[in-house]
Image: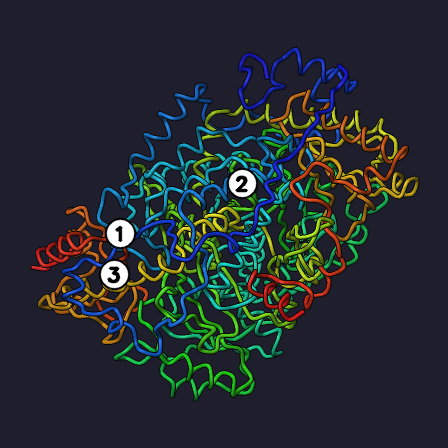
Amino acid sequence: MKKVKLRKFHAASWDEPFIMQMGNAGERGILVPGVDPEIAQAVGEVESLVPENMRRQTPPALPELSQYHVLQHYLRMSQMTMGMETGIDIGEGTCTMKYSPKINEQLVRLPKMTEVHPCQDEETLQGILEIMYKLQGFLSAISGMDMFTFQPGGGANAVYTNACVFRKYHEERGELAQRDEMITTIFSHPCDAATPATAGFKVINLMPDKNGYPDLDALKAVVSEHTAGIMMTNPEDTGLYNPNVEEYVKAVHDAGGLCFTDQANANSIMGIARARDAGFDACHFNIHKTFSSIHGCEGPASGAYGVREELAKYLPVPVVTFDGQTYHLDYERPHSIGKVRSFMGNLECIVRAYAWIRSLGPDGLRLVSETAVINHNYLDKLLMKIRGVTRPYGPDKRRLEQARYSLEKMYQDTGVGTIEVRDRMVDFGIQSYWTSHHPWIVPHPFTPEACETYSREDIEYWAAVIAQISKEAYEDPQIVMNAPHTQAIRKMINLEQLEEPEKCSLTWRAYKRKKELA
Amino acid sequence: MGEKWFVHPYIPNSVPDIREEMLREIGVDDVEALFVEIPPHLRFKGRLDIPEPIRSEAGIQRHVEQILARNKTCKEYLNFLGAGCWQHHVPAVVDEIVGRSEFVTAYCGANYSDHGKYQTRFEFNSMMGELLNMDAVANPIYDWGHAAGISLRMASRITGHNRVLMPKTTGPERLAQIRNLLQPQVMSTHIAIVLVDYDADTGMLNLEDLRNKISGETAAVYIENPSYLGTIENQGPEISRITHDHGAIFIVGTDPMSLGILVPPADYGADIACGDLQPLGIHMNCGGGQSGFVAFHEDVAYLSECPLELYTIMETEVEGQYAVAEMIAERTSYGSRDKGKDWVATASGLWTIGTAVYLSLMGPQGMKEIGETIISNARYARNLLGAIDGVNIQFNTASFKEFVVNFDGTGKSVSKINKSLQERKIFGGKDLSGEFPEFGNSALYCITEIHTREDIERMVEAVEEVIK
């Protein structure tokens, strides 16, 4: 490994006001089509078209700026945002911050996608339906499931779809009143607990055993005639593949429940292992993670949800079918759960995923997973040499594409914890890492994922930044405690206000009012 | 990998020498050694059954373009479909900003490195707050249906009641989505939906039916304005009074595009407003442009029950410098899993940025003018269609950009009429005969600012021809 030279980075810092403070009365950002004079003559005054008590009397206090200045303001906003394409984004583990190819971006911005209405006759949607149908097939091959839907507008929406499908399954069997418990694991994404709760289930969270796997004995103790199913992840955010996964599935199946695997962490298993082969009845993929669709400041996203044959009749409508010549939208599905999101989902994500898979093929997909696992293990080797970094659970166990680390030791030694490190690393021109979902079972956590996008040099740079911050923490912790130093803004103050809603302002108008009152 | 190996441009470490060196550094001979934790019988032994790769970028472009070419678009055809996804003009500056690499590829970066993203979110909230005349706007979620569903669930938690009233004019697909969120009856936390009749002449809520169905056990009354069927509800103040007299929460779903000329729901008593951002600068994307907003007054009870992320303005060490940060995060599913309020997740972040740019461009005058053009265009189309023999307009009341057209008098089904229109490169209004059989052969027509007088007249002439 060559010596890494850390960058002297400084983020754009435009000292830019809020747009509500900008512009002048009367400026225009865009002109819109006016009322055609002949139409005006035919239909009369606009006032006459709106019931009197429904006419807006006070115009909304929106900003008034010229077009150039709106553009400039938001270009500055974008420059003060570190996209994964500029900052090495190995830190946002479980998010699989992979490169979303520009050619695919061009394709989804064609009018053939952007100017299509979802209620058009299926005859006029043949292109997008073909892509949906074929991608269903690819995901079935990767997971072993029989049928997929792309309706969910994100990963959690797909996980929720699963809760609805399991609910419908038990409802149709007349057992729903009795089967009102859903089991999940504490290292699964919060949505594996929250969405079944929203769907009406009592949720049981399994804690990890001493090896970091969900406690199998605890599972065996809680499954019963009340069990609707389990919603779990493998590998979990620890990066550990649970080798006894079939025993969990069996315990739940034996009790009459169904089994779902949340595959947000699927980047390590394409062509390596399949959900169905471990006995799962259903699974999902995050199209914006594993399959390269954009992250878009948190959406538009897509959760592809797949099931085995017996559950296919419950999928939301419509379902795409193919008669050998033409693609169809099938709404006549009496057992369907109905809708989980309007129309057919975020189909631009589906086009990106299709194009990405076609560029890789079967061996390429496997190469993605192999490389993601190699990259992570390479990073792991570097991180484990850094003072203050530990990796709980199974010290001799191989992690797949990511792992959860702890800075507890650094915190105990120096007072510098994971939040401070997160806020310092951005000074070196890389994106802040993601710590962990709550609760922090692993204290002072961080969870990197060096997916296949990143080069060896990127991984070495990332590890070198953590090593540098460790050195600072042990030698001169104030540098870290006062970070960041080279960002758009300085450190926030009065953080305790974030827990006091009456001291917060969610809009500029609320802030102004409070300031004037004060 | 074997003979199929190729160095892939998206995978730098696919260069064999680099891979070998990395494996050596890790201390293994073969990549298989890294998968030891997966039991052999769970390993997938075959080769994935997906097509061989298209190796060049040019090839990918050609291939996908050829498939997408089979879509017909609303630029090639004259479009009158709406029903929750609406064709409006998307300003070039919006496309420029939502196409910026930084916004396209950022995700959950924290406050400092992604300050621009956070400031833009706060600006979005602030401008939506002005449009809606409300002080608290949450970070948006999937779409209108989800926004309405979680608003109803909020109301249920705030009031402690589990019965909500909704209009019978609610679109069936949105209603299906809400039904899932409010759970089947057998669940112990089920929230019952009671549908309130509409006035057959006006399409507005039947107040007598509302009075009959509301009680002290009602958590919320939800209406839409404009409604799914396009009508403007002018009984807002009265519905609000009835709702509040029973201690229930008044929720209004609204098309924000109408709010340059229509009174915002808060002004007639709405406690929660929700709806879809898609009309405000987001391409239709075959339904991929939806984004659901939720707004309310600054009331701790509402803030505490909102499942979505809430952002507040903050101060920094530098006087006069602001930051934006997430508040009371413990309340969300990210903070408390199943003990949090419903769930929050990745949904439609880029579209909130697009909407911020859109509202900045439009300003108060732009929103007023576009509203005027839309309502005038729609009325013009409605008048011309209604004047055709055998064609009737379903409701005699004011409408914004959509209205129901009844073809019973033509003796032709909507599906047949729409097929004929399609041959003339026109997408007719959405067929309602399945969704609202009580309207007979009816379609929901949508007219916006993108339609010219000539477009409308061409459509009307085509309808006249095809019903003959």
**Residue B187 appears at what percent x and percent y?**
59, 70
Are dots 3 and 1 on a single chain? yes
Circle 3 crowding by C-alpha within 10 Å: few under 14, some 14–19, many from 20: many
- Residue A326 in sight here: yes
Are dots 1 and 2 on a single chain? no
Residue nearest the observer in this picture, A348 or A487: A487
Instruction: Check the residue under mark 3 and report the chain it is in.
Output: B
Question: Where on the picture, by quarter, is residue B404?
Answer: bottom left
Secondary structure type for disc 2? helix
Instruction: Check the residue under mark 2 and report the chain it is in.
Output: A
Residue B445 image label: 3
Residue A111 left/right relative to A342: left
The amino acid at mark 1 is Ile
Mark closer to the observer (3, 2): 2
Question: Where on the picture, by quarter, is residue B137?
Answer: bottom right
Are dots 3 and 2 on a single chain? no
- Residue linked to disc 2: A76
Count of picture labels: 3
- Residue linked to disc 1: B450
Please report the residue visible at 33 percent of the width from the left and 33 percent of the height from the top: B67
**Residue B139 appears at what percent x and percent y?**
56, 56
